[in-house]
Image: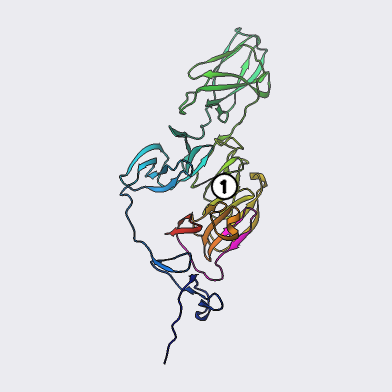
């Protein structure tokens, strides 16, 4: 029996769903799909090329590696230490900060500063030194009443303080009250400050018997301030009772805020005040554990255990589930493809790309999910993954 030779190229990819006969595509431009492709790469023109073997890059136990897209320097984690890697092959690095237990971290670049988030918090690096992004709220001040030493009318006065660092203000302390006799003064002693980089304690005061707080003075650390007469000319507190921005295992910048995620909760900073967070309003709770976060102009793509949802809106309180994509994503596999980084129509605009149960999926800024391989692939899974976009292709390493 004579067997006619069959052309095996060009190969257009994998297909584990179609019948055997459907793997061959005939016509003017014949091609073939394969059931599996082990230890080979499929080139852009459909040929097979032996995949290069593994090469040991470094013996150091770096994890969560990330490269600054502007300056090219590489950051990562060594145990609980956040490091900038100077020589990967030699394992030489500089320690920037202790970011807590070894549970993963995420990076982003914002306003020419590198930020990293872990479960212990958020840090920033300006090229010279790293420091926590937020400041812990101070404890309440200690008040003393000086009888006959001032011109305060008799009544109750409230005081609170906030830390000041590089022009930023922390959330305010709890309010402390003093009952003052007529013609007296109040001495305010801010608490001991343990926050790095803080230069002053900002003291706020109410009018007689309550009312709004007003800025009175920025007191040097370690000093007390006497208030014989309220000026009530200053502005109110910027961030009353707000907390430092909490950390998480995912970190994104979105519409003038930063976003972190842990468990099933997204948390947001205040607009253009990345260091503070309103724990009452600045969060969104989802029904399942979050497995990835990609922020886009029109909303946020969020990976869940068995689906991916798109939260549409322009601020945390307005976010709503506008669409969802069925199929379990590989945790951590999402990456942002900028315009021109992917081929075809997908490369015309920004897209979120992740590997899921049915192959790669592209999410648009408007919330549309495009199944790129659902007709050909199914049953893909992994405990975790990480993706890059290179030479108009997405690559994912899956664990």
- Front-most of 56 and 292? 56
Q: Which residues are magenta?
A: 362-382
Q: How is the image coloured?
A: rainbow
327 or 10: nearer the viewer: 10
- Quick check: 174 above or below 84? above
Q: Quadrant of the C terminus?
A: bottom left
Residue under the image location 56 percent in, 37 percent down? 274
Query: Image quadrant of residue 346?
Result: bottom right
> How would you rate the neighbour count of disc 1 (Cα within 10 Å): few for under 14, some for 14-19, many for 20 or more?
many
Q: Nearer the viewer, residue 25 or 29?
A: 29
**Which quadrant is home to the N terminus?**
bottom left
Residue 167 percent location from the top left of the image: 55, 26
Which residue appears farthest toward the top when viewing the image? 148
Residue marked by disc 1: 266
Question: Which element is circle 1 on?
Answer: strand
- State the image coordinates of residue 150 (x, y, percent, origin top left): 62, 8
Give 248 or 380, whichever is nearer the viewer.
380
Q: Is residue 24 visible?
A: yes
Q: Position of residue 308 (x, y in %)?
A: 57, 58
């Amino acid at each position: 029996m004579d067997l006619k030779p069959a052309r095996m190229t060009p190969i257009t990819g994998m297909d584990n769903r179609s019948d055997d006969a459907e793997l061959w595509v005939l016509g003017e431009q014949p091609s073939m799909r394969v059931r599996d492709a082990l230890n080979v790469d499929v080139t852009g023109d459909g040929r097979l090329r032996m995949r290069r073997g593994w090469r040991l890059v470094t013996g150091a136990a770096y994890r969560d590696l990330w490269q600054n897209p502007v300056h090219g320097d590489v950051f990562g984690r060594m145990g609980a230490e956040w490091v900038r890697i100077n020589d990967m092959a030699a394992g030489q690095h500089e320690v920037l900060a202790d970011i807590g237990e070894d549970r993963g971290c995420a990076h982003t670049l914002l306003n020419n500063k590198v930020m990293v988030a872990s479960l212990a918090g958020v840090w920033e690096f300006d090229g010279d030194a790293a420091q926590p992004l937020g400041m812990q709220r101070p404890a309440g001040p200690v008040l003393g009443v000086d009888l006959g030493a001032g011109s305060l009318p008799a009544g109750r006065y409230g005081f609170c303080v906030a830390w000041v660092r590089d022009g930023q203000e922390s959330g305010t302390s709890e309010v402390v009250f003093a009952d003052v006799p007529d013609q007296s003064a109040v001495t305010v002693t801010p608490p001991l400050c343990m926050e790095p980089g803080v230069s002053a304690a900002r003291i706020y005061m109410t009018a007689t018997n309550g009312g709004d707080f007003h800025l009175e003075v920025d007191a040097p650390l370690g000093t007390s301030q006497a208030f014989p007469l309220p000026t009530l000319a200053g502005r109110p507190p910027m961030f009353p009772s707000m907390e430092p921005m909490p950390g998480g295992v995912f970190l994104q910048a979105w519409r003038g805020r930063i976003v972190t995620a842990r468990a099933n909760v997204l948390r947001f900073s205040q607009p253009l005040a990345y260091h503070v967070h309103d724990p009452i309003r600045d969060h969104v709770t989802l029904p399942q554990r979050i497995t990835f976060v990609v922020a886009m102009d029109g909303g946020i793509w969020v990976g869940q255990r068995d689906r991916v949802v798109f939260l549409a809106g322009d601020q945390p309180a307005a976010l709503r589930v506008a669409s969802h994509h069925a199929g379990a994503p590989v945790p951590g596999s999402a990456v942002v493809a900028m315009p021109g980084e992917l081929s075809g129509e997908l490369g015309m605009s920004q897209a979120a790309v992740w590997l899921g149960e049915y192959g790669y999926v592209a999410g648009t800024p408007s919330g549309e999910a495009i199944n790129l391989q659902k007709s050909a692939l199914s049953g893909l899974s992994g405990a975790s993954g990480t993706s890059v976009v290179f030479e108009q292709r997405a690559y994912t390493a899956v664990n």
